[in-house]
Image (cartoon, grey):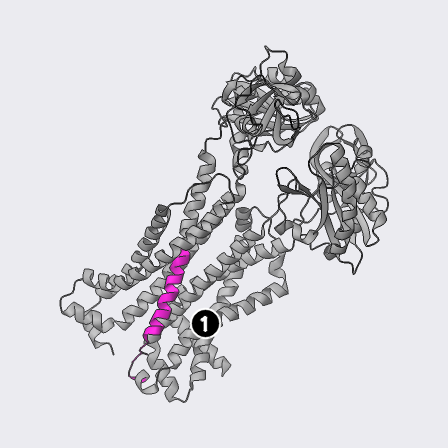
Amino acid sequence: MIKNYFKIAWRNLTKHKTYTLINLSGLTLGMTCVVLIAIYVHFEFSYDKHNENIDRIFRIVEQEENDESGETEFYPLSPLPLTTALVNDIPEIEAITNLDLRETLLVNGENSYSENGLFTDSNIFEVFTIDLLHGQYDQVLNDPTSIILTESLALKMFNKTEVVGETILLANKVAMTIKGIVADPPKNQHFHYDFICPSKIRPQFKQDLLDWASNNYTAYMLLREGYDYKAVEDKMVAYEAITKEVYQNMDLPFYPKFSLQPVKDIHLYSNMYDELEENGSINYIYFFLLLAFIILFLASVNYINLATAKSRSRSKEVGVLRTMGANRQNIVFQYLSESIVLSVFGALVALVLSFVLLPYFSELLNKELPFELFFSPYFLFGTFCFALLIACLSGLFPSLLLSRLSPVKALKGHFVKVSNGQINFRNVLVVIQFVFAIALVAGSIIIYQQIAFFQDKELGYKKENMLHVNYSSSVVAKNEEIIKEALLTHPNIKNVSISSHLPMEMKSNGLVDHWEGNTNNDQVNLYRTFVDYDFIDLFDIEIIEGRGFSRDFYSDSLGAYVLNESAVKKLGWTTAVGKRFNRGVVVGVAKDFHAQPLHMRIEPLYMKLRTSFPNKRRGEIVLSIENIELHEIKDFVMHTLKSISPIDIFELKVLENTYDELYGQERRLGQAFNVFAFIAMFLAGLGLFGLVSFQVFERTKEIGIRKVLGSSVYNVVILLSRTFLSLLLVSFLIATPLGYYLMDKWLQNYAYHINLDGWTFVIAGMFTILIAFLTVSVQAIKAATANPVKSLRAE
């Protein structure tokens, strides 16, 4: 019997090719989207799960509460004395390791490489699961001059992995012996590295061992089996008294508190200052899951509507089956078998399409999603079960509708006269379809507008026709003026500046307690950056009071400051020039400019000359150039820098591109929105096509009579379109407040954003209605131009 069900189902599907193609394309498209989203969600939830003891690994988090401002900030950092004390005093802790990730220069012979180094200790192998390919775990980090390379870095530097015993230079200074080769860190790990070496090699390590106020490391602990990390947190409170005393001795109005964070939660649930790498977001997971539901819902509704519309032509088939003894259950199974065949076949095609589209989807999300999941039997079995579920949900209503026909009426060609409730059910489905479609289209427009807002907003500084080179080199630092002079010899380079930060990345901040009028010894937290004499002119930052830095005033190199408007306001001043500030004097006030991404409001900021910058070996060389092709000037800049420091690695970037990268996540979100909005619109159109087909079938004789009585094609099209246009109006009225609420919540993530207005939703609604009207018109015109004689003879 089951074999017969599927045989008849296959015959019906191949007989009605157009109907089958439309249904199959909708289901396949929907399941392809779901498969791709499932791979992405699975990948995001798999972060750090490769560690054997992931449920027992925790990160120490430092919480700072400013008693004056009331602000609370979280950092994934902790002092070394704390971790030493914890592992000695708390028996529940099995091991602790401290990590410090930083870009470092490696030199092998005449070749140099700028790589991401992990400075740590041998306990890292106890806490994390790291696959050591060459070497022994107890020896690879046993002395300060040992180093471990990843497999890919070994191939990059030596073209082989059997390099244990070889020597390379760290920072072009210290000879390091390669003691081991490890597998590349998994893509789904919340931090990545190219080599590992002991923290002891760093000059400040000995000082950090005793300094409770030095937070240069990220600490991870492995708890013994059976212990609750909350109990360990309670014991950590005892160490807060030590840090409180240290911070009070430093006259700081706060002290850190410590807590533990499960490592398995870091990627999706952590967004602290100074994260090792940019993490994902559980909100993005919810967003894509919602999209998967919407797409799948639209595809399923399409099948229901199209199957219902086609049911009229199959009424005699049902009558024959009932006359031959088939009961209602047999009818249901017969028509469910068709949806099963369609869904399973669609799932197979969806798997193939997903495999082909995965690289493009990965590029869209800026992720390296794995292909391995396609070869997992669990994934394949889950996809098959999912297809069966979709088949049952999609095919159940049409099969129940057909099974209600009585044999006599069915053989006469009558169709089930659906009740108003059932008509409303189908209408409700179409309304929901277009609510989703309109909301997604409006969301796409709003995200596009916000991204355009980022690009077009007046930032308070110039970023056009600018290039920059980041460096970390003491050689470059010692020759800054020579480099500037050499670069300015090029006719297309108008100005050069060297600063500690780019204008859009000034995230360094610190406390200031000395300024004129501070009689209560208050402290304020100000952002800061260290610049040269040409910085303000190069970026065309407006000075509204006083002046910028000048070589004509020797005193500027001793302790001159330029504050922004927000800093002057925070200090309680009305004018600032000439006033004492932070053991120096204010020489100018700059008009507020966006020194941080637009997620943040303009913060109080001061600028000081680089002569007092504590880390001059790091910085940004910025060039203002004529509007020419990049390649015309790149070779000159690289040659100039290499002539000063041949061993260092330099990369010339366009400042506008660097600025745009700050909003890469938003841009990817916008692209995803565009793709899924298009898919939603396409599927909603298919659903509307199904409902129009159903109405045309139901009103075949009516249309024929109207044509005989003189109705024009226009009259018939309006007659059939009126109902659907009213449904679209209802969809618009529902989608507008829903979309407004959701997009307003999203925009609140940015301190500076566009203002929502009703026109965005009007445009989205009009666009959707236009697409829908064209869809309706195709079917309506086809019915209106049909021969009325054939319509009147239909039984």
x%, y% of residue 85?
A: 83, 45
Image position of 763 with respect to 28: above or below: above
Image position of 103 with respect to 266: above or below: above
Judge left or right: residue 548 versus residue 739. right
- Specify whether residue 60 is in view: no
Main secondary structure along the magenta-highlighted residues: helix
Q: Residue lying farthest left?
A: 710
x%, y% of residue 505?
A: 58, 32
Q: Nearer the viewer, residue 454 or 380?
A: 454
Judge left or right: residue 776 versus residue 177. left
Kind of residue indicated by mark 1: Ser
x%, y% of residue 215?
A: 73, 38
Question: Label 1: which residue?
Answer: 339
Q: In the rendered view of the protein, which quadrant contains the C terminus?
A: bottom left
Residues rendered magenta in the picture: 411-438
The image quarter in which residue 635 lies:
top right
Which residue is at a point 45% across and 41% down the rendered structure image? 450
- Specify whether residue 585 is in view: yes
Which residue is at a point 33% across and 66% down the rendered structure image? 691
Numbered marks: total: 1
